[in-house]
Image (spheres, helix red, strand yellow):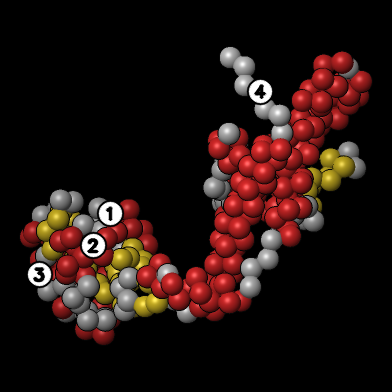
């Protein structure tokens, strides 16, 4: 029963989050909208169409066009009038009815400002962002190569950043080489301890004076910036808290509704 309920919540979420305004293409006068895209994106849970690279978006849009054409062909051949289609339609009516009703019930759920503030104050540790560092690195196989790179950087003076990027592109064996060694923002737990221990001790705008050995090889690390451990302000997480509280209230309401209805119903379990 719990599994069925959770599946319905997932289906509800899909209905809740899909907007159908944007048009991506037209085929035989019929538009390809976000509704058509959403139907295909359900096969990729957790993936946002907006975040896909353009070639992947184009592929999805072309699939939606083909799907629209196939649907039109099915209609043309009278599938809607077939007994098989009518039976299948009856089978999904109850699920669809439940999903629409759950969406309506969810819209009724309200969360007060005081509830949001209480949750925030009671759970501040959930909103702590750890210390982070923005780093570049150059990874080579030998200590000698790393020392040579450090020597070149020491001679670069004020041009150390451009020199670092140049050396990273030319000598680093890491995938970040093409971006001048750029790794971006990291927390200590996201990288191996030997790397983190050194990176987080650097001053902003400084690079390691000796090679850093890890299981991957020898690193030369440059610290671009650093952010201390901070607690996100209520204004930054208010929306997130509200949505979580609404969902919690909704789930509790559905559980209670199911229990109340069952208590009034005549239930016979047969094996």
Q: Position of residue 55 (x, y in %)?
A: 60, 46
Q: How many marks?
A: 4
Query: Which residue occupies the foreground of this view, 61 or 185?
Result: 185
Q: Residue at x 71, y 38 (%)?
A: 264
Q: Are marks 1 and 2 in contact (CB under 8 Å)?
A: yes
- 185 sits to left or right of 87: left
Q: Position of residue 63 (x, y in %)?
A: 69, 36
Tell me the number on the disc at residue 268.
4
Q: CA distance from mark 1 to mark 3?
A: 19 Å
First in sequence: mark 2 vs mark 3: 2
Residue at label 1? 174
Image quarter hosting the N terminus: top right
Residue 209 visible in image? yes
Query: Which residue occupies the foreground of this view, 233 or 73?
Result: 233
Q: CA distance from mark 2 to mark 3?
A: 12 Å
Q: CA distance from mark 1 to mark 2?
A: 7 Å
Q: CA distance from mark 1 to mark 4?
A: 64 Å
Tell me the quarter of the picture where residue 243 sits: bottom right
Q: CA distance from mark 3 to mark 4?
A: 75 Å
Q: Are marks 2 and 3 in contact (CB under 8 Å)?
A: no
121 above or below 262? below
Q: Residues within 10 Å of mark 4 (few under 14, many from 20)?
A: few
First in sequence: mark 2 vs mark 4: 2
Q: Residue at x 22, y 81 (%)?
A: 203
Q: Residue at x 30, y 73 (%)?
A: 131
- Does dot 3 land on a helix, a strand or a loop? loop
Residue at label 3? 210
Q: Residue furthest left?
A: 144
First in sequence: mark 1 vs mark 2: 2
First in sequence: mark 3 vs mark 4: 3
Residue at label 2? 138
22 above or below 66? below
């Amino acid at each position: 029963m719990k599994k069925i309920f959770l599946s319905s919540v997932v289906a509800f979420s899909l209905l809740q989050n899909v907007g159908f305004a944007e048009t991506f293409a037209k085929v035989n006068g019929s538009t390809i909208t976000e509704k058509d895209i959403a139907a295909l994106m359900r096969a990729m849970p957790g993936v946002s169409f907006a975040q896909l690279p353009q070639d992947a978006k184009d592929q999805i849009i072309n699939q939606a066009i083909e799907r629209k054409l196939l649907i039109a062909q099915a209609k043309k051949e009278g599938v809607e009038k077939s007994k098989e289609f009518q039976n299948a339609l009856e089978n999904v009516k109850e699920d669809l009815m439940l999903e629409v009703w759950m969406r309506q019930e969810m819209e009724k759920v309200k969360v007060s400002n005081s509830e949001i503030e209480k949750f925030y104050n009671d759970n501040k540790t959930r909103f702590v962002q750890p210390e982070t560092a923005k780093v570049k690195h150059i990874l080579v196989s030998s200590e000698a190569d790393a020392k040579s790179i450090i020597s070149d950087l020491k001679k670069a003076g004020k041009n150390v950043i451009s020199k670092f990027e140049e050396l990273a592109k030319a000598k680093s064996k890491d995938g970040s080489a093409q971006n001048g060694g750029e790794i971006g923002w990291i927390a200590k737990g996201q990288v191996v301890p030997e790397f983190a221990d050194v990176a987080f001790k650097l001053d902003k705008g400084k690079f390691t004076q000796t090679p850093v050995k890890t299981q991957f090889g020898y690193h030369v690390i440059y610290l671009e910036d650093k952010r201390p451990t901070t607690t996100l302000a209520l204004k930054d997480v208010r929306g997130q808290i509200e949505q979580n509280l609404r969902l919690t209230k909704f789930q509790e309401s559905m559980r209670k509704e199911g229990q109340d209805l069952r208590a009034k119903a005549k239930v016979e379990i047969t094996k």
